[in-house]
Image (cartoon, coloured by chain):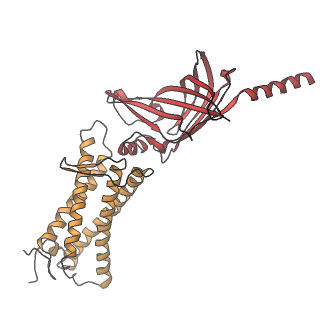
Amino acid sequence: MQTRNSKTQYGWVAVLFHWLMAPAIIGMFALGWWMVGLSYYDPWYRQGPDIHKSVGILLFALLVARLLWRWINVEPAPEPAPRWQQRVAGAAHWLMYGLLLAIFLSGYLISTADGRAIDVFNWFSVPATLQGLENQEDIAGVIHEWLAWILMGLVVIHGLAAFKHHFVNKDRTLKKMLGRAPHE
Amino acid sequence: MKKLAVLLFATLIGASAQAAEYQFDTKGAHAFVQFRIKHLGYSWLYGRFDKFDGSFVYDEAKPEDASVQVTVDTTSLNSNHAERDKHLRGKDFLNVDKFPTATFKSTAFEPKGDGKALLKGDLTLHGVTKPITIDVEEIGGGKDPWGGYRQGFTGTTEFKLKDFGIDYDLGPASQTVEMILDVEGIRQ
């Protein structure tokens, strides 16, 4: 399997980015949703948010690397479909990138609102920058939660669309993202 | 009858002239609304409300007529930790989206001598109104260096969070919160 993308095929780097981040992002949503309901004496009360913040920072770094990789690679041509569908799909992909960035940023602004740094798995820490805005942690918190729900809505549509391409249209959309099946 | 009316009028004038109204010195931040609650039963956690306002009526000659009212902006909670503040403002605790203010209105003031007193009144917190009693101590009062007249008190009270409908479990040692109120009023 090739490293870089071609006109017809994703390279393994792009495939790896996608399948590394997809379960991590969905898992982060589940973790975030679950951890805010924990009781004070739950062993996960501190561990859950620690992991959520650490993984969030790492995902941000991955997304930046992914966008750079995308920028220096060609995009495989989309499967034949009506023009509007291709446009909507393209817009949805960019919307997901944008939502992810906004979610990472708002999450970061919650935890660093008072100037505290975010510790990533006791490995390194990310210092606060923008801090001390009026009720910063509350406003960032509302944005973080809403955007996460919107992103999950898009993820569901994105997944359903992939299955529709695979089972209804029987085209190579999903196979390409799995890094398989070059043109026979 | 006319005599009585004159006497009554004179008494009213006299009373209103002595019982001065004081505004909390929030502008100069010589007033604090603080709380403390035990963490796990191992230490005290302190927090405060940064935004509030209030006034009191106080007459040194007739302290039993004193009255106090305070309005607290619950969104201004500050415990020196943003993530904790967010949690305390949220639905598990103060639910400030729904209950952005807490108020206290006194109903009685009972001097106990030695500058100490019991201040009784209704506290509205988290949408629940309940009577509470605040132990008050007069710290001092008199002219300030800038042409004004001030009077200051400290007050403490405690209540169970559950009594005000806040039932997030912080553990058996953390059921009760103490409030520490320090105010300096400027005579109007």
Q: Is residue B127 left or right of residue B67?
A: left
Percent position (x, y) of residue A25?
Answer: 24, 59
Q: Is residue B89 left or right of residue A121?
A: right
Percent position (x, y) of residue B20?
Answer: 69, 30
> Camera-side residue: B69 or A44?
B69
Residue at the limit of the structure toward the front, as seen here? B145
Q: Is residue B134 left or right of residue A124?
A: right
Residue under the point 31% across and 27% down: B42
> Camera-side residue: A158 or A113?
A113
- Tell me which corner region of the image, top left, top right, bottom left or bottom right, holds residue A105: bottom left
Q: Is residue A178 left or right of residue A136?
A: left
Residue at the limit of the structure toward the left, as seen here? A1
Compared with A151, B68 (above or below) is above
Percent position (x, y) of residue B8?
Answer: 84, 24
Q: Which chain is orange?
A: A
- Tell me which corner region of the image, top left, top right, bottom left or bottom right, holds residue B134: top right
Give the mark count: 0
> Camera-side residue: B139 or B37?
B139
Q: Is residue A24 visible?
A: yes
Residue under the point 23% across and 70% down: A67
Which quadrant is home to the N terminus of chain A?
Answer: bottom left
Residue at the limit of the structure toward the top, as seen here? B113
Which quadrant is home to the C terminus of chain A?
Answer: bottom left
> Camera-side residue: B98 or A168?
B98
Q: Which chain is red?
A: B
Q: Is residue B1 visible?
A: no
Compared with B170, A74 (above or below) is below
Percent position (x, y) of residue A109?
Answer: 35, 54
